[in-house]
Image (spheres, grey):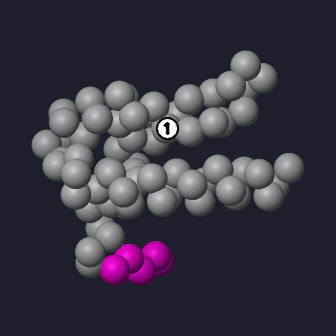
Amino acid sequence: MIWVLPQNVLIIHAFIAVSTQWHHGPSGQVIGLDYAGVRAALKALRIKTRKVFRGLQIMEAEVLEGLTLNK
């Protein structure tokens, strides 16, 4: 079981919702989220982008750091 602070629940849901919105570089490496795709996905789900965007950027940075460390 994973415990999430109540103020982060919406960010986690949003991150899962945009999990298909990753940009890939020429050799297939993940380089970051496609913010236009993120915005569209959040709008479709009626999630207010401003409330979660910074949290998504923090999670994006952690994913990218994790991928770098695993090389």
Q: Position of residue 6 (x, y in %)?
A: 26, 78
Residue 51 position (above or below residue 22): below
What range is drawn magenta here? Answer: 1-5
Is 31 positioned to the left or the right of 34 in the image? right
* In this rendering, position of residue 60 left or right of residue 17: right
The answer to whether any part of residue 13 appears in the image is: no
Q: Quadrant of residue 21?
A: top left
Position of 24 with respect to 40 (left or right) is right
Question: Which type of secondary structure does the marked residue at label 1 adopt?
Answer: strand
List x then y, in percent, for residue 28: 72, 26
Q: Position of residue 41 (x, y in %)?
A: 28, 34
Amino acid under label 1? Answer: Leu
- The residue lying at 18 percent from left, 48 percent from top is 47
Q: Position of residue 52 (x, y in %)?
A: 29, 56
Kindly identify which residue carries mark 1: 33
Among the 4 quarters of the image, the one containing residue 12: bottom left
Q: Provide the major secondary structure of the magenta segment.
A: loop
Other-residue count near label 1 (Cα within 10 Å), few / some / many at <14 / 14–19 / ≥20: many
Q: Looking at the rendering, which quadrant does residue 65 occupy? A: bottom right
- Considering every residue shown, the one lying at the far right of the view is 71
Residue 29 in view: yes
